[in-house]
Amino acid sequence: MKKKKIVVIGGGTGTYTTLMGLKKYPLDISVIVSMTDSGGSNRIIRDEFGLLPTSDLRQAIVALATGKEESLLRKLFTYRYSLGIGISGMTFGNLFMAALSDIMASQEAALEETCKFLRVKGNIIPVTFDNSQLVAKYDNGKQILGEHHIDEPTAQIGEHKLIEVSAFPPAIANPKAIKAIKEADLIVLSPGDLYTSLISNLVIKGMPEAIIKSKAKKVYVVNLMTKFGQTNNFKASDHVFELYKYLRGGFVDFVLVNKPFKLTQYIKDKYKEERAIIVKDDLDFSNPTPKPKVIRADMISKLIYEKPKSDNLIRSLVRHDPAKLAKAIMSLV
């Protein structure tokens, strides 16, 4: 039988988790990856190497890696240096891809060769090859340039409502991304930071139109937790309707939301420090037409993520379980 074509759109940990689950199934997988990251290793990659960010690409590569050496290569490409002037906090995978880009005089060619090296199951597609930054506008009139500053805003900025994000300078979608969307059977808008991982793809010229026009079924996976400075006190409906805004009124067919869950006191305290709360499921689509179908399932992982000491960025502790999430998505195929 002809394999179903699934396109995952996003970036970061949420997309990594989605891909880890889906690769277990006989699918033709493509992942369209955000290219506006500007924090951590990517600041050096952009500012000192003059390349586009590689961290989200690296995570997608690692998620879809196959072969006997998969486990070792995954550890190698995610290894983060804790020592060394200038490289502390950098990952081996980012440095590998930066070196290969220099050798091949092309970041696109370096990506293709890295995928071959790790025997990637699927197509990894940067949403754009234009050098663009994410800009956020807040309800107090302030504007912030750079994904990292949006992800981890100052307390004064983060308390304000984020009302709009855009790409500066404007960027045009990678033709390969448009082609994959057009040919897809199912499009997955993956979990992750709403603006900096997901909507950062939708502000690229040509992406919203392609998604709306595609005959594929479309599913959005709602986040488990809010994010300070981006989705303060957001409920599930706030996430969904914000997504509709950037899809220019285009509706998804399905919304996947986790069943109610509780946090341990330790995790509650950790998230309280980050000023994040559980995303409340208040979804009720009795009015909009067409009406998306809400699917509620237990998709949460029992594992609690602990980041290495060399990682200075804020990471989610509570995450989706790859197998459970993939099972829920596959029920739509």
Image: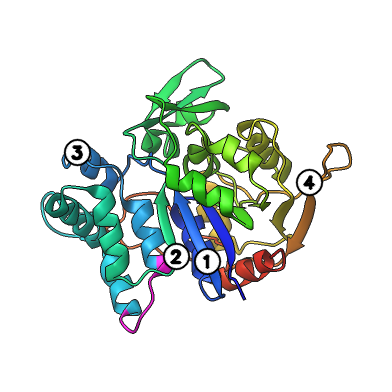
Mark 3 against mark 1, which lies toward the viewer? 1
Mark 4 against mark 2, which lies toward the viewer? 2
- Label 3 neighbour load within 10 Å: few <14, some 14-19, many 20+: few
Residue position marked by numbered label 1 in the rendering? 28
CB-based contact (under 8 Å), mark 1 and mark 2: yes
Residue position marked by numbered label 4 in the rendering? 282
On residue 122, the disc is 2
Quote the CA–CA distance across marks 4 and 1: 34 Å
Q: Earlier in the sequence, mark 4 or mark 3?
A: 3
- Taking depth in this image into account, of 238 and 157 the one nearest to the observer is 238
Kind of residue at disc 1: Asp
Quote the CA–CA distance across marks 3 and 1: 33 Å
On residue 50, the disc is 3
Prevailing secondary structure of the magenta residues? loop
Kind of residue at disc 4: Asp
Mark 4 against mark 3, which lies toward the viewer? 3
Q: Which residues are magenta?
A: 63-69
Q: Earlier in the sequence, mark 4 or mark 1?
A: 1
